[in-house]
Image: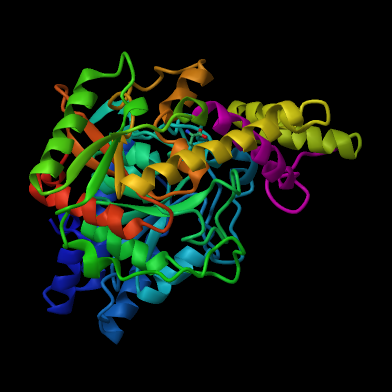
């Protein structure tokens, strides 16, 4: 049962030499082989390579770094030298693209001694909220395999929930860490924009994309964030703001902490089980010594519409590099260069990517730029100001992660707007560039996990983690496991 351990527990056993890193890697491989058929979380396996690395670590001796010898999976957008990385898109899968370099994040993890097991499923180029746009098919929720695991990082969340690895790397542009973590009963953090490096992670929307982990509990989340955070000379948008020691303050509790409940996040028609669980979580935080304050974030209703203008604009620009000339899908006997591009991109991209390229190109065109792109950027500033005002009064803000628990596979088929509305509580933080995490706060009557979102001010990961840790320790939700 080694696969069921947390990072902290596995590290303690490694240090005492009760177990080896090779045993941990083998436990994750066996577990993945046993259960992944029913959830489809993993799209590339680097198992032989992982075993070799584990043996090397065992020979050299496990260091005091809490991630040394610990296996993990990365979302299929993190480049690793020589490992297939396809963004779950046929445009890269068809030629089995293997990057010639490592992302900063996987490099930092390697330096700490963590061992990559391979890649997890995602919506194509991370566009979606269910993994249903992946060219490898949907990932199913370990708590109920008729339901989605969420998205786009559904593979990462499901893999951790199913104990296939001790943690997984994910990305959050408009909720893709928090929503799948919430749907799978795991915990995941979207850090402040600029806290983690995007270098070597395939971009969707460069001014919105963030890099973060999904873990089994908050202590593990703090450990992984610590290992990957900080300035990177390869990503000019990372900040040299000092990275605090998250572990040092994690257990300081919430006594005297001011917590905001935004009235705009408790909307009419909201699922009563979700609302109930979040309100109970608020009470639990009060009983731990925090104070609760109703606040207002007046521009909340514009966050998702604004996201779905800005995100496609950046998508239309970022996707331009996939032209079949240097790498990826190619076609035979083109009539001319235009025919080549048209066929490569028509065959390689799926419908959601094409939809966003078209919307983004339209919104950026000379005649519509002012009406859509510029207007959305102005609204983005207003949303950011809402949060800045709120953080003058409170330390953190809480809300649900999603309006409902995980939905059925196919429920939003042919309805892209219904899928976009999945992010309704998750786009404001993106516009503001602030950190936010999800932590399990209960289960629906159908035994589906419900996520609590905790948001902090810019660079406030420390406070967010501290609040989440206090809550988690006072509850038993994180100890439950799906029966797979
Ligand atoms: N659901 C959102 C979208 O489709 C979020 C995606 C993400 O964060 N990568 O854009």
Residue 41 in magenta stretch: no
Residue 309 placed where, x, y %? Answer: 62, 30
- Looking at the figure, which quarter contains the N terminus? bottom left
- Looking at the figure, which quarter contains the C terminus? top left
- The residue drawn where x is 58% and y is 58% is 98
- The residue drawn where x is 70% and y is 52% is 327
Q: For residue 93, what is the image quadrant?
A: top right
The reply to whether residue 476 is visible in this rendering is no
Front position in the image: 289 or 178? 289
Outermost residue, bottom side = 60
Q: Is residue 403 above or below residue 288?
A: above
Judge left or right: residue 346 versus residue 72.
Answer: right
Total marks in image: 0
- The residue drawn where x is 52% and y is 15% is 414
Q: How is the image coloured?
A: rainbow
Judge left or right: residue 307 versus residue 454.
Answer: right
Magenta segment main secondary structure: helix
Residue 326 in magenta stretch: yes
Which stretch did the figure color magenta? 304-333
Outermost residue, right side = 336
Residue 202 placed where, x, y %? Answer: 58, 51
Judge left or right: residue 142 versus residue 202.
Answer: left
Residue 277 placed where, x, y %? Answer: 17, 30
- The residue drawn where x is 72% and y is 26% is 371
Q: For residue 185, what is the image quadrant?
A: top left
The reply to whether residue 382 is visible in this rendering is yes
Residue 37 placed where, x, y %? Answer: 31, 38
């Amino acid at each position: 049962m080694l696969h069921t351990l947390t990072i902290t527990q596995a590290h303690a056993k490694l240090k005492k030499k009760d177990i080896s890193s090779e045993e941990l890697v083998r436990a994750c491989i066996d577990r993945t082989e046993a259960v992944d058929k029913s959830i489809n979380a993993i799209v590339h396996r680097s198992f032989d390579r992982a075993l070799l690395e584990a043996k090397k670590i065992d020979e050299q001796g496990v260091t005091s770094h809490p991630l040394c010898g610990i296996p993990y999976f990365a979302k299929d957008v993190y480049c690793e030298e020589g490992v297939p990385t396809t963004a779950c898109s046929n445009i890269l899968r068809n030629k089995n693209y293997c990057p010639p370099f490592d992302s900063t994040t996987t490099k930092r993890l390697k330096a700490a001694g963590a061992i990559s097991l391979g890649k997890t499923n995602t919506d194509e180029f991370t566009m979606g909220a269910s993994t249903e746009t992946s060219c490898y098919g949907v990932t199913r929720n370990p708590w109920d395999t008729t339901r989605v695991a969420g998205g786009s990082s559904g593979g990462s969340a499901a893999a951790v929930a199913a104990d296939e690895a001790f943690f997984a790397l994910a990305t959050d542009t408009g909720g893709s860490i928090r929503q799948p973590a919430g749907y799978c009963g795991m915990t995941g953090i979207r850090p402040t924009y600029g806290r983690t490096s995007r270098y070597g992670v395939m971009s969707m929307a460069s001014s919105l994309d963030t890099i973060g982990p999904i873990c089994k509990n908050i202590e593990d989340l703090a450990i992984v964030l610590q290992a990957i955070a900080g300035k990177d000379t390869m990503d000019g948008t990372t900040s040299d703001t000092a990275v605090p020691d998250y572990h040092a303050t994690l257990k300081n509790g919430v006594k005297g902490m001011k917590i905001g409940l935004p009235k705009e996040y408790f909307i009419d028609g909201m699922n009563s089980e979700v609302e109930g669980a979040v309100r109970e979580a608020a009470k639990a935080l009060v009983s731990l010594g925090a104070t609760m304050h109703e606040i207002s974030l007046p521009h909340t209703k514009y966050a998702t519409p604004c996201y779905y203008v800005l995100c496609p604009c950046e998508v239309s620009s970022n996707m331009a590099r996939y032209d079949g000339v240097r790498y990826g899908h190619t076609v035979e006997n083109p009539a001319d260069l235009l025919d080549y591009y048209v066929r490569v991109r028509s065959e390689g991209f799926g419908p959601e990517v094409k939809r966003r390229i078209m919307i983004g190109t339209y919104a950026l065109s000379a005649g519509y730029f002012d009406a859509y792109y510029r207007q959305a950027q102005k609204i983005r500033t207003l949303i950011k100001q809402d949060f800045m005002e709120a953080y003058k009064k409170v330390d953190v803000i809480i809300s649900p992660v999603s309006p409902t628990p995980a939905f059925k596979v196919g429920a939003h088929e042919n309805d892209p707007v219904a899928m976009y509305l999945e992010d309704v509580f998750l786009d404001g933080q993106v516009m503001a560039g602030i950190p936010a995490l999800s932590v399990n706060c209960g289960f629906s009557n159908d035994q589906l996990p419900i996520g609590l979102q905790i948001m902090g001010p810019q660079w406030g990961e420390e406070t967010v983690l501290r609040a989440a840790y206090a809550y988690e320790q006072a509850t038993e939700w994180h100890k439950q496991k799906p029966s797979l």
